[in-house]
Amino acid sequence: MNKQTTTNTSKWSKFRHLFKRQEIPAKTILLQEGHISRTMFFVEKGCLRTWVNNDGKEITTQFFFEGDKVASIESFRTNQPSLYSIESLEPCILQTISQQDFQNILEDFPEIKEEMQEHLFRRLLQSQKTFYSYLKNNPQQRYQELIEEYPHIVQRIPQHYIASYLGITSVSLSRIRNRR
């Protein structure tokens, strides 16, 4: 555990009584697109993904692993329907906190609010980077970026989800991988 993780864990430990531990099997929908997000998930073990439905086709938008915080933050903060679903890809151990308890923490503890703002800023930067990569790079370049920046994704995530994330078919991803 690095110093940053230790510091964050100690900040959150005083709120342990507000969290519920949940063991979730793989392929469990935690939030359905179009529903309002009322829970924040802290991934203790396992992997989650976010995805959107495009005419019956699932398009993966992000992956989350141990130590990550996940919610449809837009829905969580505004009480508007979520733009995407959240699903477990592996059996997971999650720490969950309700929307109301989370809001109370943010109001009462400025250091936690600041940490969350930094977290959201990093997520925004990552989303922008991914968006511009889709505009500028071909699938092979996007796959190369993924391998270089997030090798754990390629090691842990099934190929069809990676293909969806890259905006290509599994067959195209196989061809790209075979060229390497």
Image (tube, rainbow, N blue to C red):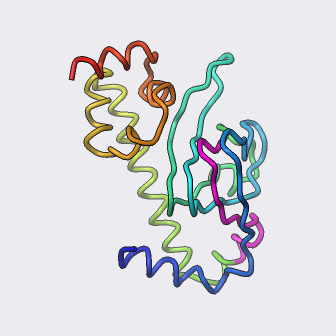
Q: Quadrant of residue 32?
A: top right
In the image, the segment drawn in magenta is: 86-104
Residue 170, percent from left and from top: 45, 18
* Residue at 27% across, 36% down: 145
Observer-nearest residue: 23 or 7? 23
**Above or below 14: residue 37:** above
- The quadrant of the image that shows the N terminus is bottom left
Residue 28, percent from left and from top: 72, 42
Q: Quadrant of residue 86?
A: top right
Observer-nearest residue: 160 or 133? 160
Q: In this view, does 58 lie to the left or right of 158?
A: right
* Residue at 67% across, 81% down: 15
Residue 134, percent from left and from top: 37, 27
Residue 164 highlighted magenta (yes or no)? no
**Above or below 147: residue 180:** above
Label tally:
0
* Residue at 49% across, 58% down: 120
Q: In this view, does 125 lie to the left or right of 36?
A: left
* Residue at 29% across, 19% down: 176
Residue 13, percent from left and from top: 60, 83
- The quadrant of the image that shows the C terminus is top left
Q: Is residue 135 left or right of residue 8?
A: left
Residue 100 highlighted magenta (yes or no)? yes
Residue ranking furthest to the left:
180
**Above or below 141: residue 48:** below
